[in-house]
Image (cartoon, rainbow, N blue to C red):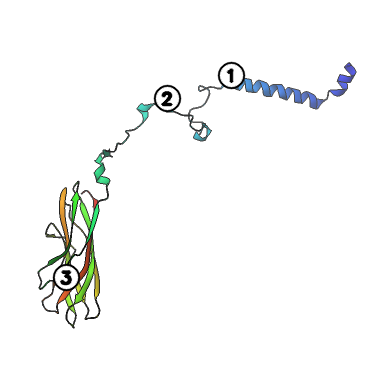
């Protein structure tokens, strides 16, 4: 019996048995010895954590920053982040008789806070004679001309018409309702001019 056991034992068998005991003993040691005190701070990446394993109990609320609310975002009211805009199209005729500006289209915009407004306008200029006609168009905010908006418009002789467009930004407007208009005139030294299909769009850019 002893001779048979000796014949079956080999160096490989002995090494395998020793390795088995070391492996089993190591896992027991890890289970008993590894804890939060033995793990180096900042040594474990987040992907080593089990999904959904961290809850509110593990989070120290005092270490979190201020959580914004719907009424104040970064110290500013929520209305400061709203995109407010309106547009309107011409209703009726826009036929200036001289250099006095005539309102072709108007839009009203209610601002919750002070801010600047981007204005975009367009239309068609029509010569009512046969030699071509000239005029000018501009924006006005509460009957005050918007700086940089006046443009010259030339209408080619019939049957051609001339498309035109203009863009400008108002000075800061206070909170409340504002009247924004696109107005045009006729140069006295030319043929008669008329404006059709005019439209205006107004969008609040923000405060300041």
The image position of residue 9, as x and y in percent, is 84, 23
Q: Nearer the viewer, residue 124 or 57?
A: 124
Ranked by sequence position, the earlier of labels 2 and 1 is: 1
Q: Nearer the viewer, residue 187 or 19?
A: 187
Q: Quadrant of the N terminus?
A: top right
The location of residue 113, given as percent across then percent down, is 19, 46
In this rendering, position of residue 161 left or right of residue 185: right
Identity of the residue furthest to the top in this view = 2
Q: Check contact, mark 2 vs mark 1: CB within 8 A.
A: no
Residue at 79% x, 27% y is 12
Residue 169 is at least partly visible in this image: yes
x, y percentage for residue 121? Answer: 23, 64
The Cα–Cα distance between marks 3 and 2, rounded to whole angstroms, is: 69 Å
Secondary structure of residue under mark 1: helix
Choose top left, top right, bottom left or bottom right for residue 131.
bottom left
Residue name at image x 15 percent, y 48 percent: 176
Which mark is in front, 2 or 1? 2
Mark number, residue 115 = none
Residue at the disc numbered 2? 57
Which is nearer the eye, 59 or 175? 175
* Residue at the spot 18% in from the left edge and 50% down from the top edge: 110
**Secondary element type, mark 2:** helix
Name the residue carrying label 1. Answer: 32
Vertically, is 89 above or below 178?
A: below
Label 1, label 3: how far apart the Cα atoms are? 88 Å
In this view, 119 is above or below 34: below
Q: Which residue does the numbered mark 3 point to in the structure image?
A: 136
Q: Residues within 10 Å of mark 2 (few under 14, many from 20)?
A: few
Picture residue at 66% right of the left edge, 20% below the top: 25
Dot 3 lies on which element?
Answer: strand
Dividing the picture into quadrants, the one containing residue 157 is: bottom left
Ranked by sequence position, the earlier of labels 1 and 3 is: 1
């Amino acid at each position: 019996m002893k001779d048979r056991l000796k014949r079956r034992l080999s160096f490989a068998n002995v090494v395998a048995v020793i390795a088995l005991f070391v492996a089993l003993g190591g896992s027991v040691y890890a289970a008993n010895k590894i804890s939060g005190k033995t793990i180096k701070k900042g040594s474990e990446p987040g992907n080593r954590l089990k999904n959904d394993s961290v809850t509110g109990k593990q989070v120290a609320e005092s270490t979190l920053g201020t959580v914004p609310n719907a009424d104040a975002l970064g110290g500013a009211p929520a209305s400061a982040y709203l995109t407010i805009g309106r547009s309107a199209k011409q209703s009726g005729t826009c036929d200036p008789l001289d250099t006095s500006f005539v309102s072709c289209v108007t839009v009203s915009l209610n601002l919750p806070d002070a801010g600047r407004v981007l204005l975009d306008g367009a239309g068609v200029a029509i010569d009512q004679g046969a030699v071509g006609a000239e005029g000018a168009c501009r924006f006005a905010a509460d009957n005050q001309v918007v700086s940089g908006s006046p443009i010259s418009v030339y209408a080619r002789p019939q049957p051609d018409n001339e498309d035109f467009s203009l863009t400008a930004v108002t000075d800061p407007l206070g909170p409340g309702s504002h009247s924004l208009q696109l107005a045009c005139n006729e140069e006295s030294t030319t043929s008669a001019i008329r404006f059709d299909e005019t439209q205006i769009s107004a969008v609040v850019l923000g405060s300041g």
